[in-house]
């Protein structure tokens, strides 16, 4: 499988071989779904907390006698039915982490790569670099390629490219090492540098 390589002006300047075992497989929806669920679960802090009736101060004395007042019987002013009372089944700090094994994680990423290629939403660019952060130049690159909501993937951390992308609504820049299935699905298009494609094929094969 081959893909066109574009320059920053949106012109085709060559082609690159894409490995079928990464960019040409039948997408596995179950693996993709599990990876996204795990990613979102792992983003949760799990620091929510509320007090049960046993943890709230006060409430030691019975508010009024059991019988004869005409009011409902009550044993504590810290009952969940009362103002300032405890919380029934109060949430407590917990760990939401879900583990996804390496094999499934790789299958999920390969599935998304393959789906992007099949839907013509994956673009390869050569020479994507700036002498200084230039958001206006990055916007021009997107316009030349006729792409909108885009995930830009670089081989290594490129500070000038990252800073050029971060102020564009609906766009994000990430190195290959920090790539995840959620971001790959969140953005309509993927713009990979030629070096990042080579690194992806090196890592996933």
Image (tube, rainbow, N blue to C red):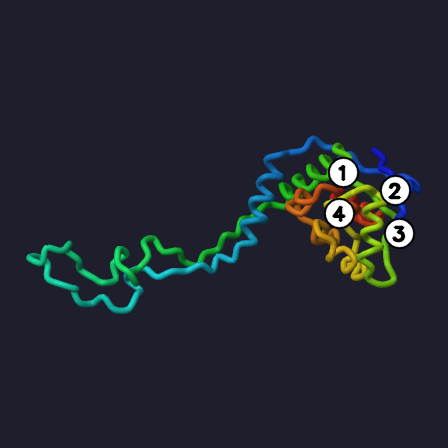
> 8 or 107: nearer the eye?
8
Q: CA distance from mark 4 to mark 1?
A: 22 Å
**Is 13 on the left-hand or right-hand side of 153?**
right
Dot 4 crowding, Cα within 10 Å, few <14, some 14–19, many 20+: few
Q: What residue is shown with label 2?
A: 5
Q: CA distance from mark 4 to mark 2?
A: 21 Å
Q: What residue is shown with label 1?
A: 121
Q: Position of residue 18 (x, y in %)?
A: 82, 38
Tags 4 and 1 in contact by the CB under 8 Å rule? no
> 72 or 150: nearer the eye?
72
For the residue labelled by badge 2, is the local secondary structure a helix, a strand or a loop?
A: strand
For the residue labelled by badge 4, is the local secondary structure a helix, a strand or a loop?
A: helix
Q: What residue is shown with label 4?
A: 203
**Image quarter of the C terminus:** top right
- Mark 1 or 3, nearer chain start: 1
Dot 2 crowding, Cα within 10 Å, few <14, some 14–19, many 20+: some
The residue mark sitting in front, 4 or 3, is 3
């Amino acid at each position: 499988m081959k893909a066109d390589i574009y320059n920053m002006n949106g012109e085709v300047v060559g082609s690159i071989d894409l490995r079928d075992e990464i960019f040409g497989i039948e997408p596995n929806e179950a693996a993709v779904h599990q990876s996204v669920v795990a990613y979102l679960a792992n983003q949760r802090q799990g620091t929510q907390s509320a007090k049960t009736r046993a943890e709230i101060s006060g409430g030691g004395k019975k508010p009024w006698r059991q019988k004869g007042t005409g009011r409902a019987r009550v044993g504590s002013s810290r009952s969940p039915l009362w103002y300032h009372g405890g919380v029934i089944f109060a949430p407590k700090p917990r760990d939401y982490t879900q583990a996804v094994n390496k094999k499934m994680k790789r299958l999920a990423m390969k599935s998304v790569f393959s789906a992007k290629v099949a839907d013509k939403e994956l673009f390869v660019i050569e020479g994507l670099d700036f002498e200084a952060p230039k958001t206006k130049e990055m916007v021009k690159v997107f316009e030349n390629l006729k792409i909108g909501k885009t995930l830009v993937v670089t081989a290594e951390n490129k500070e000038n490219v990252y800073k050029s992308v971060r102020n564009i609504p609906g766009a994000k820049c990430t190195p290959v090492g920090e790539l995840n299935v959620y971001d790959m699905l969140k953005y309509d298009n993927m713009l990979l540098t030629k070096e990042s494609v080579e690194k992806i094929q090196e890592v996933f094969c």
